[in-house]
Amino acid sequence: MTEQQKYNEKQLLRDLVAGDEEAYKNMYELYGDAVFKMAVRYVKSEELAKDVSQDIFIKIWEKREMLAGVEYLRAWLLRVTRNESINVLRAAGKSDIAKGEIARHFQDNPGFFEDETLQRDYRLFIRRTLDSLSPRSREIFLLCREQGKTYDEVAAALGISRNVVRKHMVASLKKFRDAAEDELGTSLSLALPLLALLQEIAALSRHK
Amino acid sequence: MKKEELHRQLIDRYLDGTASPEEVEVFFHLLNRGELDDQLEDAPMEEVPPEPAPMEAVSPEPAPVRRIAAWKKYSVAAAVILLVGAGVFFLQQGRKAPVSAPIANVFKNDVAPGGNKAMLTLGDGRQIVLDSAEKGNLASQGKTNIVKTDAGKLAYSATTGAPTTVLYNTLSTPAGGQYQVTLADGTKVWLNALSKLQFPNAFTGKDRTVDLTGEAYFEIAKDKSRPFMVRVNGMQVQVLGTNFNINAYTDEGEIRTTLLEGAVRLVKGEISAPLKPGQQAATGVGGAGNAPGIAVSGFSIHNADIDQVMAWKNGFFSWDAADVHTVMRQISRWYGVEIRYEGTPTKALFGGEIGRDLTLTQVLTGLGKSKVHFQLDGKILTVLP
């Protein structure tokens, strides 16, 4: 930056610490937009970003003595904005409503159900594991999970007891669980939070 | 791919606005667990002189295709868990799963499922929290080493020579906890939630005796010269070499012992009864806590549904024509929630299997449907008709 600019920033800082209202207006005009844009990058919602920005500028005015140690105002402002935005995100994460408001900005992005590769990987995994089941277990599994039949319906359709249906299902589910752990390894533990979302679009379990 | 690398990708995709809705969900989840703090701070923002350039944090270029593919594995894993746990199955290409009918559940928060949590109290009174303990040698007692062999597993091994001092240890699990321990003789015990096992660090003497409260599954190491005995709530299970499950939660109103393999003899006061594999014996707990129709003295023996009895150890809830109270007691122990009923508790019966590794709201949504509704506030779960 030019000597002039450096002088100006240093002067601005001094004036701010001294409580000069004109300097404060200048700072807002110079950096308000950058602060807002930084906040938006993190909190996504423009309304939320506006709140974050305003809070920051208010706090700077009320606690302007903390500017005394700052060397580069712009960089410091942006770091403060980033930290405050992250705090807001943490708080928002605890409220479904706030989280939903932020997540809204992503809803047009392709997710699991629109991603061809994901769907294919998933179907491949299912097919491989299904093939490892006994023919009878596989038949029962597909009736229950693909056609959504209850244990009683399957028992009636196949002429076997409900208990036998249950035994097959329990064994098959165990095989799926073990295969998933082997193949997907630690991804299972990270994937659990994804379920909170997938659950909302999941079909009802019809086993009575 | 390392977790840190994946976290970095997730943060980048969130900031870029390219993350999928599922990824955003994961982002918030990890953020609130503090797992992203380091990397969020790392985003370079040194004090630099002002530049005309835009103020975006310096982040790596959008990841190349092969890195994205690895991240997406998590979406597949999630779908599989849902398949195994809550009974959903997406097979058709491009078909979105049907949206569930609106349910009148009110969830103010969620509760994480239980996991490997337990506390070990040594003979000298020292207490070790096992969840967070590092793998490896935890302590030595007399001539026995206590080793955490893996997540959720504890093993007692005798060092050289005959054991001199016999000290009693207690392994206890909280609500939402479970743990496995291998005793000094090689016997393996799996403890369910809210349970306690008291045992010696070494078995000297003519027999092997342990004390149990709650629920545990035993695989007894064969030793013809020393019979194994489990003392539970006024009753004893005498075994030689066998596999069996004991459910002795006092709020169940009865003690249920189910034999899988081998042979056991149940003794209570003057009455003793042998069990054969596949059988279950039930006896009352005495006092006001008895289940109706269960004799306090003596045993009631019948054939058991082994899968249902062992479901907990295999990671499932398994119910077959179970009433709402039975279901809720198990939910309460695994998620550590207090159960309240509003209005007349439903007489509906519940059946099916649900994974134990799902969060509470996921399980409740799987259970609820048309039969019953829930309200969750903090750790209080209210059941409504």
Image (tube, coloured by chain):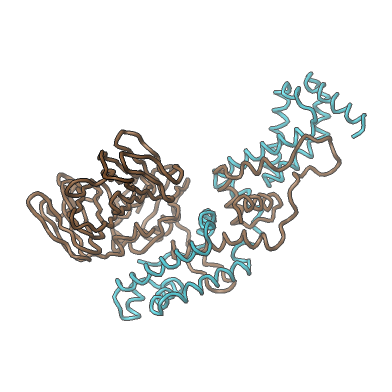
Residue A76 rendering spot, x and y as whole percentages: 75, 32
> Quarter of the image containing the C terminus of chain B?
bottom left
Image: B266 above or below B80: above
Q: Which residue is drawn at the image coordinates 19% and 58% (left, top)?
A: B224
Residue B152 rendering spot, x and y as whole percentages: 40, 50
Q: Which residue is drawn at the image coordinates 35% and 66% (left, top)?
A: A208
Q: Colour of chain B?
A: brown
> Quarter of the image containing the N terminus of chain B?
bottom right
Towards the viewer: B85 or B236: B236
Q: Residue furthest front?
A: B161
> Which of the 4 image quadrants contains residue A92?
top right
Residue B276 rendering spot, x and y as whole percentages: 18, 65
Q: In this rendering, does residue B310 appear at all? A: yes
Residue B9 as seen in the image, left or right of residue A191: right
Q: Residue furthest left?
A: B270
Towards the viewer: A168 or B364: A168
Q: Colour of chain A?
A: cyan
Residue A186 as seen in the image, left or right of residue A169: right
> Which of the 4 image quadrants contains residue B76?
bottom right
Towards the viewer: A11 or B303: B303
